[in-house]
Amino acid sequence: MAKFEILARCSTTRARVSRLTLAHGATMLPTFMPVATQGAIKGLTSQQVESLGITLILNNTYHLNLRPGTAVLVEAGGAHKFQGFRKRALSFESPFTGEPTMLTPEESISIQHAIGADIIMQLDDVVPSLTPDRARVEEAMERSVRWLDRCIAHHNQSGKQDTQNLFAIVQGGLDLELRDRCVTQMIERKDQVAGFAVGGLSGGEEKDVFWRVIDRCTQKLPEDRPRYSMGIGFAEDLLVCVALGIDMADCVFPTRTARFGIALTHHGPLNLRLAKYAKDFGPIDPKCPCPTCTEGTSRAMLNHIITKETTAAQAVTIHNITFQAQLMGGARDAIMNGTFPSYLRSFFANYFGDVGYPEWCINALRSVGIDLLEGSDIKVVPGSGAKWE
Ligand SMILES: [Zn+2]
């Protein structure tokens, strides 16, 4: 099983820095994992992804099973070789595509064995987070626990336990009592699983409900296993989750939004399609170390070609992946140095100072001992506070 070592803890929040050692090497957590839907991050080669310092990517089991299919992956020697990616990979079942999967738990594990990912996910029963039918949410939660047992049994007889690590996925919708019951049952299987994910969120639920579900799960999940929040990618969501004790997150957002011309920065997202950038000859972010920002690609250039040339989408994708990596790398450094609370304060002041702090972030961070409003004259705005120009 993977080796998981906690290297530092924040003395105020529940954030921690850890090292997760997998078959293809070690990854420092907390980390953000870009999503490679078809086995590739759209627009980038595996070498480019590696050169940006990305050590863990996420493959989609459903898509890799359709194309190229498990036979090709087995022949290629697994997804790592197929993709030419030498770092760590994780695979999972697509929860929100709306596509019927019709997989059994055993088939799901077999496919992931063929893919060869370092981290494999149990098959779970996902219902949209806004499902009003509590009985359906409860049924899905209980089924996910039963399927975890089948995944564990199938994985343990495969002989792959030394190289591939099974994660459980906590379900239970937005109902804290169902989440409690799910976590309790899954912890009973702790010796058989390498980590725990929190699934079934990011389905359009209120952010003030979202963070309370994460909070409830991370409070109960065991300290000595990595915790992974699925489908989380906005900068403020990532940092709040880290403060609540999350170690890993994934989302298509930074790469998908890049293709629409949105560049992520510490002052919020920039919509490069706007006319105001047509004569802005600076880089996306002068402090960003990515090739796009350091090799002279200007906002004006990107504005000119963003919807016309794939190289523009590629340039913004590289920048956005670097932004996420810098955000999480900065969080790790701050936790190690004992300065995570001030890292959060300065991130939120830079990012939301002009429009106001989202109320849910204030509430979530207060729950772990940080008051963003203390000594600040920045206003508070209700709702998600999503910041778009
Ligand atoms: Zn950049």
Image (cartoon, grey):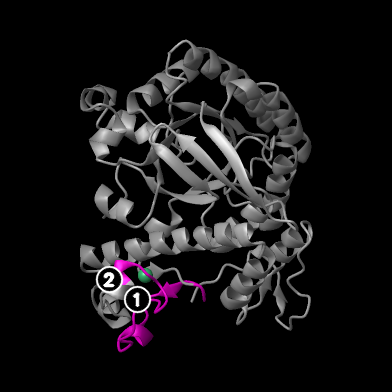
The answer to which image quadrant residue 71 occupies is: top left
**Magenta segment, principal secondary structure?**
loop
Q: For numbered disc 1, what is the local secondary structure?
A: loop
Residue found 40% across the figure and 69% down from its top: 263
Determine contact: label 1, label 2, CB under 8 Å.
yes
Q: In the structure shown, which secondary structural element does the residue marked by tag 2 occupy?
A: loop
**Residue in the picture at 77% in, 68% down:** 371
Residue 159 falls left or right of residue 377? left
* Residue at figure coordinates x 33%, y 62% from the top left: 318
Say what amino acid the circle numbered 2 marks: Ile
Ligand 1, seen in the image, is in the quarter at: bottom left
Mark 1 is surrounded, within 10 Å at the Cα level, by few (under 14), some (14 to 19) or many (20 or more) other residues, namely: some
What is the x, y in percent for residue 319?
A: 36, 65
What percent of the width, then of the height, locates residue 294? Answer: 30, 74
Instruction: Tell me the residue that label 1 is attached to.
Output: 273
Q: Is residue 20 visible?
A: yes
Residue 62: mark in rendering:
none
Mark 2 crowd level (few <14, some 14–19, many ≥20, 10 Å Cα): many
The answer to which of marks 1 and 2 sits earlier in the sequence is 1
Residue 382, percent across and down? 70, 69
- Residue 45 shows in the view: no
To which residue does mark 2 refer?
A: 306
The quadrant holding residue 284 is bottom left
Q: Nearer the viewer, residue 169 or 127?
A: 169
Q: Which residues are magenta?
A: 266-292
Alpha carbon distance from label 1 to label 2? 7 Å
User: As shown in the figure, which amino acid type bears the numbered disc 1?
Assistant: Arg
> In the rendered structure, does residue 281 fall within the stretch colored magenta?
yes
Q: Position of residue 46 (x, y in %)?
A: 27, 48
Specify whether 185 is left or right of 125. right
Residue 179 vertical position relative to residue 166 in the rendered view, above or below? below
